[in-house]
Amino acid sequence: MLDFKDVVFQFPEEEKPIINHLDFHVNRGEFISIIGASGCGKSTIFRLINRLLEPENGEILVAGTRVAGKNPAASGKENFRKGTHGRAVGNAPVCGYMPQQDLLFPWRTVEENLCLPMELQGGISKEEQHRRAQKALEDVGLAGKGDKRPSELSGGMRQRAAFARTLLTGAGLLLLDEPFSALDYLTRIEMREWLLEQWEREQKTVLFITHDVEEAIFLSGRVLVAERTPITSLTSVEIPLGLPRSIEDLKKPEIQDMKEDLIGKLRNAVIDLPLRAEE
Amino acid sequence: MSSGNTNRANLPAAILVFAFLMFWQMAALGMDAAYILPSPIQVVQKLWDLRGPLFTAHLPATMQVVAIGLIISIVLGMALAILMDASPVAEKALYPLVIASQTIPTTALAPLFVLWFGYTIWSKVLVTVLITFFPITITVFDGFRSVRTEMKDLMFCMGADTRQMFFKLKIPAILPYFFSALKMAVPLSVIGAAIGEWLGAQSGLGYFSRRMMTQLDGAGVFAPILLLSIAAMLLAAVVSVIERRVITWRNE
């Protein structure tokens, strides 16, 4: 579903690349978490996939199609730099992106927010948009909330709405960038279980960024660890837990050991770059 | 907020205004020189006596200048803001000029406009535009700058093109700023029109006020000014009402 091939990226204001000759592969339908210390370049990986940044070298394939790289037609950075954000209308986005903050537009109702990706793609009738939005609201547990303003929803509900909007991009690959980090602890726990249900139902490939090791273990089939910056490789760790999972599973000794091991890996992570703020 | 609450909140201001008017009335009575300081009651009486020419000739003339000036200012201000948002080169070139334009003493230049355009409406409109477009340009441009990068990024990831980025993100995002700008611009446009008329006109409230001054009619100077203030307040109130209708969301 997703391939990084020899990808190199460097911020213009820095001396060294933050991502250097990185290769990794994600299978269709996997739930994968990427963990790493703050500022290690996790978010940069996402920004490369959704074309907000353009790699200097190598290529990134989503479902076998190159989304960025040396093909200028697919390069987002050129357009982005000029501020035109140019892109052919009617193109489905390569991936659904869910940022840390819900970024629901306050001037739109919840349902209108969900319709946004469909409006942008074009070619979907109003009735069909309404139908899909209502279905998505039901799926994420927000039935009847479509006419509310985002400000009338709780933090957890807003993240559910943002997730529904991400689903409605129609993309097979979902990039979730610490979506629960702004929520309170109890809501977080609840949202984790909820997210797993959503993933099982939707059959999407999910890439999930977090710095919470427990969250990564609970959610993922596989965890990719960024052990050093510049990121030259991601260490893949399989999580030996079946589905469905419960919070009790995290208490198993082998899972506890794994958690300690992963935390150890992160603490020993070598960040060989001046610290930069996570985007 | 209920109207009862609003009334109670405005009570201290109302008391202060009333006290000020009382003081003014006493002072005017004490001085007994209406050509220098007419009393508030005299001003209102004058307004009533002159209601014919003021409401049928001079108020419409001034409102025409205000309307034309405001429309031109909104179009010009928005156009400049959009241009500066779209192109960094335009921003670098225009922003300092827009700021610098405010250091020009417009009132001092106004006689020149009379020289150019004569006693036509355009000399007045030009004064109005010069002092009104500025807050619109700057405030709307601030609005564009306040659009969150994360939201632009999200729109980009969802496949938005330039047009969609503009109409579905930027325009709604700047609307609250646009209304703030309008609320500043409306009273300024009334001031601009009055200044323009004061300096050279054959009708309008500003012109009428000056004519009364040459006749040493103190109350006659104040009456059109009172009318101007009421007009500006009413216009600002209309903008607020429209704003409340349009901006139904809380800005975060």
Image (tube, rainbow, N blue to C red):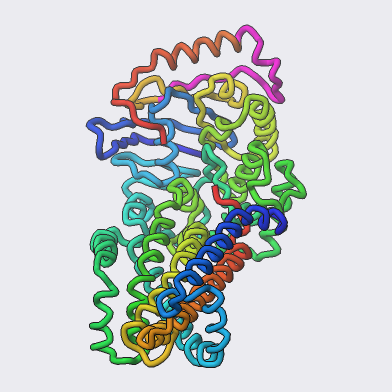
- Quadrant showing the C terminus of chain A: top left
B195 or B93, nearer to the observer: B195
| Left or right for A68, reference B27 | left
Instruction: Determine the residue positioned at 29% across, 41% down.
Output: A56
- The percent coordinates of residue B157 (x first, y second) are 48, 49
* Count of number-bearing discs: 0
Tell me which corner region of the image, top left, top right, bottom left or bottom right, holds residue A181: top right
| Relative image position of residue B22 (x, y in whole percent) | 56, 64
Q: Residue at x 71, y 25 (%)?
A: A244
Left or right: where A204 falls relative to A47 = right
Viewer-side residue, B28 vs B151: B28
Residue A14 can be seen, yes or no: yes
**Was residue A166 drawn as part of the magenta stretch in this picture?**
no
From the viewer's perspective, tell me whether residue A53 is left or right of residue B39. left
Residue in the picture at 55% in, 92% down = B52
Question: Which portion, as a residue range, is magenta?
Answer: A234-254
Is A34 located above or below residue A148 in the figure? above
From this viewpoint, which residue is outermost toward the right? A144
Considering only vertical position in the picture, is B234 above or below B207? above
Indicate the position of residue B150 as horizontal and vertical percent values: 46, 45
Q: Is residue A243 magenta?
A: yes
Q: Is residue B164 visible?
A: no
Please give the name of the residue rendered at 60% of the width and 44% of the height, measured from the top-left corner. Answer: A162
- Classify B219 as above or below A163: below
Q: Position of residue A158 (x, y in %)?
A: 64, 42
Camera-side residue of B28 and A134? B28
